[in-house]
Image (spheres, rainbow, N blue to C red):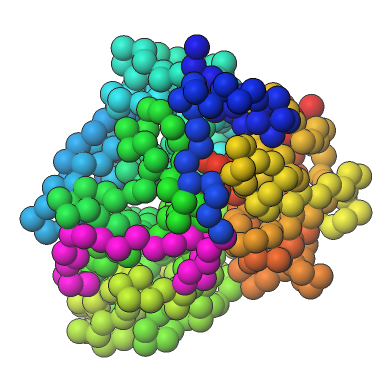
Amino acid sequence: MTISRRSFVRLGAAGLLLPAAAGCGVRLGGLSAGNNSAQGSAGSELSSAAPLPAPFTRPLPIPDVLAPVRSDAEGDHYEITQRAAQAELLPGLPTEVWGYNGTFPGPTIVSQRGRPTIVTHRNELPVPVVVHLHGGRTPAEHDGYPTDMILPVGGADHGHQMGGMSATGSRAYVYPMDQPAATLWYHDHRMDFTGPQVYRGLAGFHLVHDDAEDALGLPASDRDIPLMITDRAFAADGSFAYPSVDPSLTGTPGVTAEYMSGVLGDCILVNGAPWPVLEVDAARYRFRLLNASNARRYQLELDPPAPMVQVGSDLGLLAAPVAHERIDIAQAERFDIVIDFSRYAVGDEVTLVNRYGSGGAAYVMRFRVARRAPDGSRIPQRLADVRLLTPSDTMVRRSFVFARGGAEAHGMTLWTVNDQPFDPAFSHADPRLGSVELWRVRALNVEHPFHIHLAQFQVLGKGGQGPGRFDGGWKDTVNLDNGDHADLLVRFDGHRGRYVLHCHNLEHEDMMMMANFDVV
């Protein structure tokens, strides 16, 4: 009999595993190392064995927008096949990506508020997958719970089905899209293996539009560009380098000891291209920034310095635009910004740099001003009606501590929430549908980005102060430094059911830093 990993850890933490269980071939890899932070991020950096290209030589790719296979009274229907494919991410070297429709990033899905979107995913990969619409206000059965897997065509589950609502071969996810315009994204969420499967390419944009945003006059069409920022390391043959204990992702989960705090790559990719360059008009552009890295945080700045005007956060527009000289963006956070290139002369070059990075990780991409062009866009002084929540809106207060410790298995220390490793059968909270709760979330040992499914929150304060400069608007992810805490006003609406909260450092998430809550 194959012992599930979660059962193994729960029994081990409770002291109930008999010594003979060690002979079953089930173990946890890389859980005994110390906590590491590098370049403003929790984790250690991998060095590429393959030669990396000179920065700013490859044009920025723009992910294709996926067309629906049909539209009817139910909504707009899309089909995506998850499969392995060869891509030339580095010059002259093939890289196998696991991609949505075989591409990295996957195709962009564009939805209209109030118009249901149905996406059928077919799994032609050799492992189970789960699809989570990050930021979606989605019914629990379609949210991408970590054990609700799509087994590969043929049905192999490698002992990790774990009793969820699994399907074989394909599955349809139904998204009501009853939410304001926002920059969402979809990615793999398979229990124990989210980190390596996203690292291999399973991520894509899902944009929501609505009439209110369309009427604002923000840059649109070819001047509305999504930017998925990731970091990767490459083996000598061009394949992705990732320190999995089991590179097949079919057996023992986890990473080797020195990368337990997180995996950082030494090559920065934007939309799958290393340090790309984008030719722009001397006009305003809207960029939808997404940090889709496993563990790396970024502090983004333009060189030469110029303002980046934020118009949107994780879950939609801000009430009013905010100008930033620098933007701190943790894993899974989104910032919609406008850059006005009319301030530059034709031929000028502007580099997007990462002040947290060193070496190649200190650079992200470059913009080259190519021509003068008319520009009818604008940035209104008022963007959206955002009702500010207050503590008087809440009736329940809860605390969550993200730290390493509180549970062990055979002498190996786990990442936990409130000293407990993730257990699909245990729920930490039962918020009522339609309620607002005040949550205090604390990060210990290293940096942790807190993410919650379904619900949205406003940051009331950090570290006993008010919200940070980058915490405005409705959010689903918040950046927490080591030792920091945030007070969040969390609103639960839309759907009942079981959802998860977790650290969006994907190595931490895979190593137990996740918890259930039930909306009742």
Q: Does the magenta stretch include residue 28?
A: no
Residue in the foreground of this view, choosing between 459 and 426: 426
**Viewed as shown, does residue 413 lie left or right of 67?**
right
Q: In which quarter of the image is residue 286?
A: bottom left
Q: Is residue 109 above or below residue 226?
A: above
For residue 299, say whether it is visible: yes
Q: Quadrant of residue 494?
A: top right
Q: Which residue is drawn at 61% across and 43% down?
A: 411
Q: Quadrant of residue 270?
A: bottom left
Q: Does the magenta stretch include residue 45?
A: yes
Residue in the foreground of this view, choosing between 319 and 420: 420
Residue in the foreground of this view, choosing between 257 and 104: 257
Dominant secondary structure of the magenta stretch? loop
Residue in the foreground of this view, choosing between 464 and 403: 403
Task: Check the picture and name the quadrant holding the C terminus.
Answer: top right
**Viewed as shown, does residue 255 lie left or right of 86?**
right
Residue 97 rendering spot, x and y as whole percentages: 25, 41
Residue 401 rendering spot, x and y as whole percentages: 74, 52
**Viewed as shown, does residue 165 lie left or right of 424?**
left
Q: Residue at x 16, y 41 (%)?
A: 86
**Viewed as shown, does residue 6 lie left or right of 217?**
right
For residue 382, say whether it is visible: no
Residue 91 rendering spot, x and y as whole percentages: 11, 59
Hey, which residue is sitting farthest front in the picture? 19
Magenta segment? 35-58
Q: Which residue is drawn at 44% across and 32% down?
A: 252
